[in-house]
Amino acid sequence: MSVVKEISADGKKLTISVKGRFDFAKHQEFRESYERTDGAMPRSVVVDLKEATYLDSSALGMLLLLRDHAGGDHSDVRLVNSSSDVKKILAISNFDKLFDIS
């Protein structure tokens, strides 16, 4: 599986790890990682890009959809462990203004 989700014991934090190419092929799997049947959304979402080797425009769109689903401007969505290449793509796209990137 190339998208793995983990919810904290208290249910307040969701961590989504993306492995390999983060592109349109992962769209359904990524969406299913944060949409829950009960409609509840954890307070905090962390997208771990440590093992993401590539990011394209559809991945940027998926991150925006996640942000909207999590509450838009009031959401707490962090992108962590990005490689220098991935950070460069996020910076060029001005995602540093929408997400906490580390």
Image (cartoon, rainbow, N blue to C red):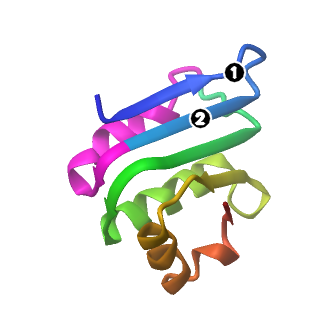
* Residue 31 in the figure: left or right of residue 70: left
- Dot 2 or dot 1: first in sequence order is 1
Give the Cα distance between marks 2 and 1: 8 Å
Residue indicated by mark 1: 8
- Quarter of the image containing the C terminus? bottom right
Q: Residues within 10 Å of mark 2 (few under 14, many from 20)?
A: many
Report the magenta residues as a range: 19-38
Where is residue 31 shown, x and y percent of the image? 41, 41
Secondary structure, mark 1, is loop
Rendered position, 97 above or below 3: below
Q: Pick the residue in front: 84 or 10.
A: 84
* Residue 3 in the figure: left or right of residue 65: left
The amino acid at mark 2 is Thr
Residue indicated by mark 2: 15
Rendered position, 17 above or below 90: above
* Residue at 45% over, 33% down: 33
The amino acid at mark 1 is Ser
Where is residue 25 shown, x and y percent of the image? 20, 49
* Residue at 44% over, 77% down: 89
Q: Residues within 10 Å of mark 1 (few under 14, many from 20)?
A: few
Asked whether 20 falls inside the magenta stretch, the response is yes
Asked whether 65 falls inside the magenta stretch, the response is no
Rendered position, 16 above or below 22: above
Q: Which mark is residue 68?
A: none
Where is residue 84 shown, x and y percent of the image? 48, 70
- CB atoms of marks 2 and 1 within 8 Å: yes
